[in-house]
Image: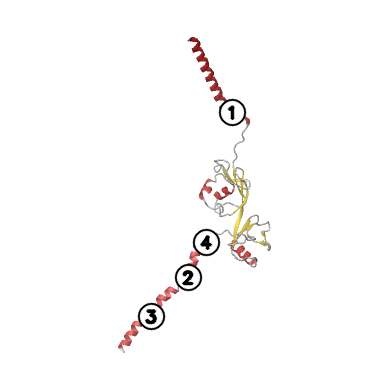
Amino acid sequence: MKADNLYGKRTVPTICFVLCICFSVFSQNPDTTAGTAQQGVSGRCRHYPLFQPGDAIQVLVYPDTGLFINGTYVIDGNGCVDLPVIGLMDITGKAEIQVQKMLEDAYIDYLRYPNIQVRPLIRASVLGGFHTPGLYYVDPRASMWNLFHMGGGTLREDGIEKSRWERDGKVYKENVIPYYQSGESLRDIGFKSGDQISVTPRPVTRGWDIFVRDILPVLSFAITASTATITTILLYREYDNGS
């Protein structure tokens, strides 16, 4: 009887201790931990959610990258994109994930692999002083370096130093070198849809400038060489006659 009482006195505290440990372990919410990790990822990889008229979206389907849906679609003035088969779809002010879900639902009967990715594209211009100047749709997560690369690089060797960032017909930034070197995204440096990058052209060369820069030095050298040659010949003749 005493042994049973002793066993019971030891068993009850042990069971209570084990229960406390189990409660402590299982009370931790795995969703909270996952949510914290997800917040960390979202903080580093930000999305740019709002689509605006005049911009565009790029639709990519993986792994079937040759599917008819793949392509770039301009957002018209009403905020709609004209998509194959389904026609116009209003995406103004919607997030990337929302548009992606809309497309997956709309094309569910046409997709073998419903893995659709939607990328926002903004309007950017590289004008004057570039090998391939033009108007481009560019991912706002791209950098200033990527934008210069799309323009084929500058014609001038000092083109980056002579580049300026323009907005609404005015110079927004005189010096783009810090933004070019930083590698930050266009959206993070404040680049807006419709902004332009242009290179200051070289001064116009006039006829007199060409003469002074290219012809006059050669002409001066030729005259100097001719004078030296004639002087040498005359001195030689005098010397020869005197001897």
Q: Position of residue 122 (x, y in %)?
A: 61, 54
226 relative position to 68: left or right: left
Q: Sequence-wise, which precedes: disc 1 or disc 2?
A: 2
- Kindly indicate whether the residue at mark 4 contacts the one at mark 2 (C-beta within 8 angstroms): no
Which quadrant is the N terminus positioned in? Answer: bottom left
- Three-letter amino acid code of the residue under disc 3: Ile
The residue under label 2 is: 30
Q: Residue at x 34, y 83 (%)?
A: 9
Most distant residue in the bottom direction: 1
Q: Position of residue 220 (x, y in %)?
A: 56, 24
- Three-letter amino acid code of the residue under disc 4: Ser
Nearer the observer: mark 3 or 1; the answer is 1
**CA separation in Å, label 2 and label 4:** 18 Å
The residue under label 3 is: 15
**CA separation in Å, label 3 and label 4:** 43 Å
The residue under label 4 is: 42
Tell me if mark 4 has few (under 14), some (14-19) or many (20+) residues whose alpha carbon lies within 10 angstroms of its own.
Answer: few
Q: Secondary structure at mark 4?
A: helix
